[in-house]
Image (spheres, helix red, strand yellow):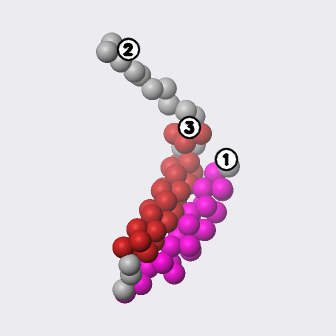
Amino acid sequence: MLISDYLADAQKLIRLSSPQIKASMTPEEAIQGALLFALGIEKLLKYLLAEINPIFILTPIPVIRDNEG
């Protein structure tokens, strides 16, 4: 995924969430609107982080697991 894709995805997700958020909503509409908005903000933050230092986003971080158990 390119860095610019994060920004494009953020814009799409936040735009999708806008019509979902209104004064009176059902619980399902509130969940869907909040989820779309949260995903948009996540993509926006990934875009900003990748602009500052792409190594944090584009390089997988190894996971250390405890083999005892």
**Mark 2 or mark 3, whichever is nearer to me:** 2
Q: Is residue 18 magenta?
A: yes
N-term-proximal mark, 1 vs 3 = 1
CA neighbours of label 2 inside 10 A, class few (<14), some (14 to 19), many (20+): few
**Mark 1 or mark 3, whichever is nearer to me:** 1
Tell me which secondary structure the magenta stretch mostly adopts. Answer: helix
User: Which residue is painted at 49% across and 66% down in the image?
Assistant: 36
Residue 3 placement (x, y as % from top left): 64, 51
Number of callouts: 3
N-term-proximal mark, 2 vs 1 = 1
N-term-proximal mark, 2 vs 3 = 3
According to the picture, the residue beneath numbered tag 3 turns out to be 55
Residue 29 placement (x, y as % from top left): 43, 75
Residue lying at the far top of the rendered structure:
68
Residue 6 placement (x, y as % from top left): 60, 56
Is residue 32 visible to us here? yes
CA neighbours of label 3 inside 10 A, class few (<14), some (14 to 19), many (20+): few
Residues at circles 2 and 3 in contact by the CB criterion of under 8 Å: no
Q: Quarter holding the C terminus?
A: top left
According to the picture, the residue beneath numbered tag 1 turns out to be 1
User: Which residue is painted at 38% across and 14% down in the image?
Assistant: 67
Q: CA distance from mark 2 to mark 3?
A: 28 Å
